[in-house]
Every structure is written in structure tokens, then in C-alpha cells.
Image (cartoon, grey):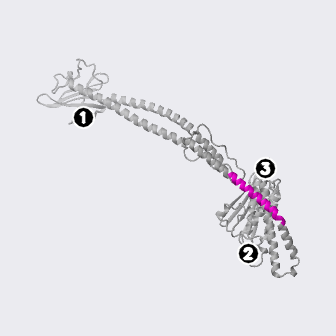
């Protein structure tokens, strides 16, 4: 039977997780592209400022006054940016080496910074990045200059701290916005998926109800068909619901047909049993009457009469079993009453010792089970237990040990076990052992002793275990089988009388 709690995530959880993962990936890609483009834009602006500063304040030669390098187009220094850097070195002489600090003051560059800048000069033109220790990362532009006699370099730079800070702020803002958006989208997708899957959950609930419905026998009523506005024809869910309803119609039709067939078979068995009773009694009576004149009959005729009488008894037993099954199916045999289990076990095993002297018989009764009273009539329990013991007696070889035990399973249930160490029951036969007319090929007949020498023993009817199962089921109990080579156990689970009060 299916359970709602299963290993692994449900389809709804996996679908919402997939949507969320896609949203995260798309958001990350968009964020990475946006941040990269914004960072490139800021760096290009710095490059433009560097190029403008280089072209405005520096010609092909060295400026006459170093201070003019910081002068704007309007002749002031108000527009100079914090973190701006200028360096002019010609013929080993440093003409200019200053940087504007965060407080707006010009500070001379130390020798290590100057050496780093000169070492970083690229052969190819264009701005580039260089790390200047405590000053941080700088974007610099270098240009060759001369004083007429000596060559050198003029380097302008700008700190990238503003670019880095702007980029970090953009990343933080984008991350928070993206996280909120993903959470809102995930909740919305979960609600949408849940609403979309509601028809499928209705189908699953109906299927679970069918799976929990006993379909093996009896009148079966299937759940109502799946209908509703959410099952629109032409949609995937609508087509699935239509196919599901058609399947239920076919299953219900098959179950009704099966139930009708079973009822016809049961009525036939009951009617046949009633009709066969009289001719069988007549045959048995005439055979018994003829046997009174055995001395006047030839030997082969006497043997034939013996066979007629034994077979008529066997047929009468089959008819009685069929009639009993018919009454059990119809509920005419109401299992009302109770029985002390231990004495009935003792009686049945004592009878088995007489008819099965070639077996070793044992009885085991637990201390707390000696006075168990089961909720089943004495005759019903005796017949069910006798059938199991007879099965062990007839289907096991000589020298087999058969043990009948009684114990409490729970506070409200007892268990009777008939265990033998015989060859076991084949797995394919064990699955249908409680069905009617199921017989093992190696079964011995209970009438084997009545056969003439050299004649084959008649086979069992295959009704004993079926009768036992029906009796116990009608009493509110169950019968189970556990069989492996060397160990076969039939277990009868019965409620204890008065336990439910």
C-alpha cells in the first residue's frame, strides 16, 4: 500500500526548487553582467579624465611650472579629484611627484611609489592598473616627454577606490534586491504550482483509495469519478483525468463481472452439493447392502463394492465441504461463541497421534496462554485446527515432527501455530495454498488405507485449507503461512474473548 510519506522530495517541491534555481542562475548572470558593465563604464570615465588631464596640462615637453599640472581649464584647482596623482621624471630628475589626499592636500610621493610607477610604464599606450601599496589600486596613464636634452615620462593617475566602492554598493544593492525578488518569486511559484497540481492530488487521493480497497473478493464499490472545472478537455490534466475515469469504468465492469461469476459458481456448488447428496447416499446404501452378502460374491466383485463404498464416502465428504463453503460464503454460519483453546488442541493432536503414528507429535502451550478463551465457536475452531493438522499429517514424510503451539500475541490476540520440519511448500504453491481446489502433487490421501494393494491413493480435495481460512476470517482472525525447506508454519491469529469490552 502506498503511503503519503515517501523517500525523496515530491514533484511539487522539486518543481519549485527547479524554478528557484533557474531564477538564481538568471539573477546571478544578470547581476554579473550589470556589475561588469557598470564597472567598465566607471573605469572608462576615469580613462577619459586621465586622457583629458594629460592633454590639457602637458604638451610634448615638460611644463614650465609644476603647479600648472594641477590647474584646470578655468585656471583653478577646484575640479581636481581626490586621489589624483601626477609624476614627471626626466633625465633622472623628478619634476613633479604629488598626490591629492582625501582632505584635499597635495602630498609628495615617496621613492618606493615613484619607483613602482616608473617600473610599471607600458610600452603600448593606454591606461592600466597598478597597485601602489598604502595608496591602493590606481588607474594610470603614462606619456613620454623631453626637456630638449633628456627623455622621461609624465604619469597621471587616479585612485580606483571610488570605482571599487561604487561597485561594492551596486553589488550589495543588487544582491538584496535579487534575494527579495527570488523569495517573492519562489513563494508565488510555490502557490501557483500547488494550485496547478491540485487536480493531480485529487487523482492521487482517488488512486490511493482504490489501492486500499480490497479487490480480491466480495462486492467492491470504487470511488466517485474525478470531475471538475479544472479538468478541461484537451489539457494534459484533463486528458489524464479522462483516461483515469475510463480505467476505473473498465475495472469496475471487470469487478462486477467477476462478482457475478463468483456468485454463479457459489450457487452452482451449493446446488450441486444438494443434488448430489441423495444419489451419493443411495449409492453408498446399495453398496453397504450388497456387502452384507460378501460370502456369495466373487472376490473381484467384493473389491469393487469396497471401492464404490469408499469413493462414495469421499464424494460425500467433498459435497459436505462444498456445502459448508457455500454456507460460509453466504454468512449462514455465524461465528458466535467462544472456546477454550488448549483443550481443543489436546483433542485434535490426540486424534492425530492415532491416525498419524508415523509422525512425532508435540504440544507447546505458554504459561500465560493455558486458559485462553478465543472468540470462536468450539466446533469451528476444532474443524479449522483439524484441517491444518491433517494437512501436516498428509503432506509430510514419515518421521516428521509436528508441533502445535499456543501463545498470546498481544493483550487482545492469541496465536495457534502448526509447525512441521517437513520438506516445505513450493513458493508458487504457497501463494495460492488457501485457494479452493489447490492441491500439492505429493499429497497423500486420507483414504489411502482403504485402497487395495497396488491401487493409487486418491488425491485430496483441496478444500481443507480454504475452509480453515474462511472459518477464521469469519471469526475476525487471520491465517498465515511461512514455509521454507525444513520448516513450515501455519499460524492462526484469533481475538481473545471479551478483549474488546
Judged by depth in the image, the label closer to the viewer, 2 or 3, is: 2
Asked if 54 appears above or below 412 in the picture, the reply is above
Residue at the left extreme, as displayed:
149
- Residue 156 location (% of width, % of height): 24, 28
Residue 24 among magenta residues: no
Q: Which residues are magenta?
A: 255-278
Number of on-image labels: 3
Nearest the eye: 64 or 287:
287
Q: Mark 1–mark 2 contact, CB under 8 Å? A: no
Question: Residue at image x 82%, y 79%?
Answer: 301
Which residue does the numbered mark 2 point to in the structure image? 456
Residue 265 among magenta residues: yes
Q: Is residue 3 visible?
A: no
Which residue does the numbered mark 1 point to in the structure image? 116
Label 1 packing within 10 angstroms: few (<14), some (14-19), many (20+): some
Judge from the rendering whether residue 105 lies leftward or rightward of residue 239; answer left or right: left
Asked if 353 appears above or below 129 in the picture, the reply is below
Q: Is residue 58 visible?
A: yes
Amino acid at each position: 500500500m502506498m503511503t503519503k510519506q515517501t523517500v525523496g522530495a515530491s514533484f511539487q517541491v522539486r518543481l519549485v526548487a527547479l524554478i528557484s534555481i533557474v531564477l538564481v542562475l538568471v539573477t546571478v548572470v544578470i547581476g554579473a553582467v550589470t556589475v561588469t558593465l557598470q564597472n567598465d563604464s566607471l573605469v572608462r570615465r576615469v580613462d577619459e579624465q586621465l586622457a583629458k588631464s594629460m592633454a590639457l596640462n602637458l604638451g610634448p615637453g615638460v611644463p614650465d611650472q609644476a603647479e600648472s599640472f594641477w590647474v584646470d581649464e578655468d585656471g583653478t584647482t577646484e575640479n581636481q579629484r581626490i586621489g589624483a596623482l601626477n609624476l614627471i621624471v626626466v633625465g633622472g630628475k623628478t619634476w613633479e611627484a604629488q598626490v591629492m589626499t582625501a582632505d584635499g592636500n597635495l602630498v609628495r610621493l615617496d621613492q618606493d611609489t615613484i619607483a613602482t610607477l616608473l617600473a610599471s610604464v607600458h610600452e603600448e599606450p593606454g591606461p592600466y592598473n597598478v597597485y601602489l601599496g598604502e595608496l591602493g589600486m590606481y588607474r594610470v596613464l603614462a606619456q613620454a616627454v623631453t626637456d630638449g636634452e633628456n627623455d622621461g615620462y609624465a604619469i597621471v593617475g587616479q585612485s580606483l577606490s571610488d570605482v571599487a566602492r561604487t561597485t561594492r554598493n551596486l553589488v550589495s544593492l543588487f544582491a538584496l534586491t535579487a534575494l527579495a525578488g527570488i523569495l517573492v518569486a519562489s513563494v508565488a511559484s510555490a502557490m501557483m504550482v500547488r494550485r496547478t497540481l491540485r487536480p493531480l492530488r485529487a487523482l492521487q487521493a482517488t488512486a490511493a483509495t482504490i489501492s486500499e480497497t480490497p479487490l480480491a473478493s466480495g462486492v467492491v464499490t470504487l470511488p466517485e469519478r474525478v470531475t471538475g472545472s479544472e479538468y478541461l478537455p484537451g489539457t494534459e490534466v484533463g486528458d489524464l483525468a479522462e483516461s483515469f475515469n475510463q480505467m476505473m469504468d473498465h475495472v469496475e465492469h471487470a469487478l462486477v463481472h467477476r462478482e457475478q461469476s463468483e456468485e454463479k459458481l457459489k450457487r452452482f456448488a451449493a446446488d450441486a452439493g444438494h443434488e448430489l447428496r441423495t444419489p451419493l447416499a443411495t449409492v453408498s446404501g446399495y453398496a453397504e447392502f450388497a456387502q452384507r452378502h460378501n460370502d456369495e460374491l466373487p472376490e473381484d466383485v467384493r473389491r469393487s463394492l469396497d471401492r464404490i463404498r469408499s469413493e462414495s464416502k469421499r464424494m460425500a465428504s467433498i459435497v459436505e465441504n462444498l456445502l459448508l463453503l457455500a454456507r460460509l460464503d453466504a454468512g449462514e454460519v455465524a461465528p458466535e461463541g467462544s472456546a477454550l483453546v488448549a483443550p481443543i488442541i489436546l483433542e485434535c493432536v490426540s486424534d492425530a497421534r492415532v491416525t498419524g503414528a508415523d509422525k512425532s507429535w508435540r504440544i507447546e502451550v505458554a504459561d500465560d496462554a493455558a486458559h485462553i478463551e478465543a472468540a470462536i465457536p468450539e466446533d469451528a475452531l476444532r474443524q479449522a485446527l483439524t484441517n491444518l493438522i491433517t494437512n501436516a499429517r498428509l503432506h509430510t514424510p514419515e518421521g516428521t515432527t509436528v508441533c502445535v503451539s499456543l501463545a498470546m500475541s498481544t493483550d487482545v490476540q492469541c496465536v495457534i501455530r502448526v509447525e512441521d520440519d517437513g520438506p516445505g511448500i513450493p513458493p508458487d504453491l504457497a501463494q495460492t495454498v488457501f485457494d479452493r481446489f489447490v492441491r500439492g502433487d505429493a499429497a497423500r490421501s486420507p483414504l489411502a488405507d482403504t485402497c487395495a494393494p497396488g491401487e493409487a491413493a486418491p488425491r485430496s480435495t483441496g478444500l481443507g485449507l480454504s475452509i480453515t481460512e474462511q472459518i477464521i476470517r469469519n471469526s475476525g482472525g487471520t491465517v498465515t503461512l511461512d514455509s521454507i525447506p525444513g520448516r513450515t508454519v501455519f499460524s492462526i491469529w484469533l481475538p481473545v474473548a471479551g478483549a474488546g469490552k
